[in-house]
Image (cartoon, rainbow, N blue to C red):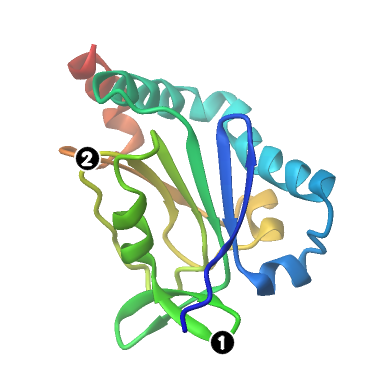
Amino acid sequence: MVKSLLKYTNGEIDLFYSRDIKEDFDLDTELDLETFALDVIKRFSYDEVHKKKELINLHAQKNNLERIAILHAHGDSVNNKWYYFNEEEFHPVQKWISSNDGKYKLLILNVCNPGKHEITSKKSCVLAPNEEHSVIMFQRGEVQEELFVPEIGYIDSYLMDFEIEKLK
């Protein structure tokens, strides 16, 4: 039987997380979960991501999407495919994206991606790491997260203004 992810909802955020992450990060109380979810969202408070936020919101308005989902689990590359783990079960990251696509304006993947796998989405924007990922690596600026926008693809920072103008 497939073990489902744990889920925490707060305001506009749904945090889906594995039992391993619950244990590793001591996410035992509602306050722990709220703090963790809000820390992930704080990434969007920095000036350099202001344009990503604008692009995501414009895309969401055009597609009548709201809310944010975060997948937080350990991940790895197995047989050239990207998986997250829930206890000892492997689950395809792309399958999680596809099952949540169109339900949220943004899907944030907090899942290691050592195989540098690419993803796809038809309706929801996706923010995904392009390599191994950890909170400490992110704080040090060692992790690059890429924004995927449906019907456009991955967005390079130098094209952000152009894509924003197209969506206006």
Image location (x, y in percent) of residue 35 = 77, 42
Q: How many marks?
A: 2
Q: Point out which mark residue 88 bears.
A: 1
Tell me the quadrant of the picture where the C terminus can be found.
top left
Determine whether 98 is above or below 47 in the image: below
Relative placement, left or right, of 2 versus 9 is left
Q: Is residue 114 left or right of residue 79?
A: right
Q: CA distance from mark 1 to mark 2?
A: 32 Å
Query: Residue 113 has which mark?
Result: none
Amino acid type, label 1:
Glu
Taking the image as shown, residue 122 lies to the left or right of residue 161, namely: left
The three-letter code of the residue at mark 2 reads Pro
**Residue 56 rendering spot, x and y as whole percentages:** 37, 28
Return the x and y of residue 161 as percentages of the image width and height: 30, 20
- Please give the name of the residue rendered at 46% of the width and 65% of the height, measured from the top-left corner: 131
Secondary element at tag 1: loop
Q: As rendered, which of 94 and 49 lies closer to the eye? A: 94
Name the residue that disc number 2 marks.
Answer: 150
